[in-house]
Amino acid sequence: MSNRVEDQHTPESTADTCASAPVAVPPGHFGPVTQTHVVRFAGAGGDFNPLHHDPAFARQAGFDAPIAMGQFTAALMSGWLTDWCGVENLHSFSVQFKAPVSLGDTINFTAVHTGSPAAPAGSAGNRAELDLTASVGGNAVVVGKAVVTAPAPADTGAGHDGGADRTLMWSPPAQRTEGSRMRRFQRWVAEHRGVQTTDYRSLHEWSVTDLEGFWGAVWEYFEVLASVQPQLGRPGAVLADESMPGADWFPGTRLNYAQNLLRHAADRPDEVAIIGEHETLAATTLTWGELEDQVAALAAQLRRLDVQPGDRVAAVLPHIPQTVVALLATASVGAIWSVVNTDFGVQGVADRFAQIEPKVLFTVDGYEFGGKVRDMTASIGDLRQVLPTVDHVIVADQFPAGSCGPLPDDVLRFSEIVTGTAEPDYEQVDFSHPLWVLYSSGTTGKPKGIVHSHGGVLVEVLKANGLHYDLGPDHRAYFAVSTTWVVWNMIVDTMIVGTSIITYDGSPTHDGPARHFELIARHQATFFGTGAAVLTMIEKSGVAPNTRYDLSALTALMVTGSPLPDSTWDWIYRAVGQDLRVGSDSGGTDVATAFIGSNPLDPAYRGELMGACLGVAAESWDPEGNRVFNQVGEFVVTAPMPSMPIKFWNDPDGTRYHSSYFEDFPGVWRHGDWVTELDGGQFIIHGRSDSTINRGGIRMGSADITQAVDRVDGVATSMVIGAELTGGDYYMPLFVVPTAGQALDQAMKDAITTAIRTEVSPRYVPDEIIEAPAVPKTRTGKLMEVPIKKLFQGAGPETLNRGTAEDPTVLDWYAEQAEAFRQGR
């Protein structure tokens, strides 16, 4: 679907066409008009006309409001029309100004077919003449004429309700829908709560208008284990205080996250729970019974080390089974877990763990990556030095003796601990007791510690995995993740409904670019979770996994981390499988889950997220706090969720927590993403609002631009920033990383410019296109657009958090570029 926001018009449903019907152009509207819109559109001769930036200059130049508004309205009309037919299909366009437009007006656009088409209306190649009208309150303000080539109507499929250019990728078969766990939940709610819902939208509406009823139903339906149960049905038993921040969920209940996850050991002790894969080391397996035994033995050891409820246990571990055991053992004793991946340097570890003052540290003797054994033994002393509160170190010893360096004499070996025997003992804690500490990206300072609760995570992941992802004991999940990323927590969470998992600590390109799909095929995984960038990398390698591997067991993909490019949507259904539910989900470390994503009842459309998740009151707002549809707005959540953070670490009065989410709209969570909410409840993600491109006063998500660029032949990846400079100037460079063996020559620059002009808007053609060695990313794969933008705005290189970067040397290159730019101004 088109993500253009140059004109911010609202397309409505396109009328059905037939062979003899006139060409149908979807009507649209823009508004309300603000002074900023007018001044910045006045004198529309170029993005850098001073009229765009200086109101005083505009007045001196003699631009009175009616003329400026007429040009402004004509520009909007042209953009609305080319959004429908494409810039290349607009052959002529002329307008007449009929009446002035005033600030606060909403402008409506309509088109009527007037000529005799040379081909059946609606077919590709149909040349048509149109009468155009822009009106305010029923009165024409601008009229015009245009000759266009009509686009072919989109095959939108059943249930189309969001615009003429949607592309249906997949619809769930009726048998699959009716047999889904979400449909069973609907039937259960109807029987036990008297709540009748017919489809996903009605189920979601109930879930956010009756928070107590919905979350109480989740608790009862999934039979949460708790030593103190809530008195469901009593007012306040589920949600005693709806304030944000400060919501009080399930007050008085006592439970344990690990106990609820390991309950499956009781009735399935001999079934596989975890498969541990590596590059060359032999795979290992843990049954549910073995997993429970190892967790019990390790938890007993932690208690012998005097780890108490509320103490912190930190880990520098890769994605291996031992990491899962360590998390569950920590949770079992009521201690607080925190983990980063082994690719972090000592300073990066210190930035996160020093603030939480851990008592015990887990690490590993080594791990395989890129065909080499990465020896971690030498780092143990350095880690102890920067983490002085650590009393004990436990090493996951997964290599034979001699493969890695010697271990210090006082460290404890994981392999020896878990061979002991102990009875499972799950500390019963308050619903709001801290479970783990995750971290913000750290791109604008030291990472903030984000604390989630046992109960909040538990009920959220029961809903997410048991309903949205449709998982259960008959499923196996594989996620391409590092332990630093919240998605690692999410793969552990899939086990809450009895799903087995595959871990892997090696390179994603070991033995070829499709390593992840080889593991999926080998172990017949049914559910694959990954970042969009991973799939795009495999796509660009030219590999078609379904021609190499048996992927017949795979039924669903959960893709997150960044918007999924249109070409990758197409590639998945062409090169992975046609009968797949692809969920492009959006959530965050902040809530340890998805806000908006997929469900088993709705079809998948390219470029769209199916809708807000159950229990998530997600909306798109304009800057004044009004809900908006079919145009770009701020993503907000208007009601509390159980998995929202209970606090930030070392934030006793909640100031940092409040300023991170609730400063702009008091009592409403502002997440920092630009989204479009469609009439049918679907969402389109445009990227982070703090990295928004704001050319001439019109906002555009950076991802909308880079997706168009990345489709150009020879482009591996790209990044665009928009830097507001002193004196009202604006600088918008595009950094392009060519594919191996390619160079950014003039032909590639021309192709990039054409792609942006035709697929996005001429407004967003960059000031410069610069070849770059790489794009800067955090260790969790997030683009570091904001820190680079600040460099170009004048910040020094010392403001960069190098410990957060995937490759700090890339930051040095951008710092040099920014310095050269500043010197040249």
Image: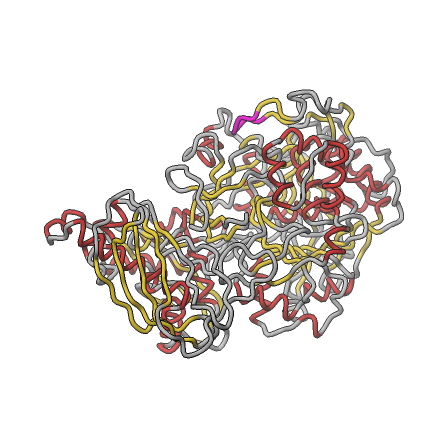
The answer to whether residue 111 is visible is yes
Q: Dividing the picture into quarters, in which one does residue 621 lie? A: top left
Q: Quadrant of the C terminus?
A: bottom left
Q: From this view, report whether residue 781 is shown above or below residue 362.
A: below
**Location of residue 680 in the rendering, given as x and y in whole percent from the top left corner:** 54, 49
Residue in the foreground of this view, choosing between 786 and 357: 786
Is 151 magenta? The answer is no
State whether residue 528 is above or below residue 537. Answer: above
Identified at 52% across, 66% down, the residue is: 154
Locate residue 291, reporting x and y percent: 82, 44
**Disc count in the image?**
0
Region rendered in magenta? 242-247
Main SS of the magenta segment?
Answer: loop
Q: Is residue 649 rendered to the left or right of residue 81?
A: right
Displayed quadrant of residue 335: top right
List x then y, in percent, for residue 767: 30, 63
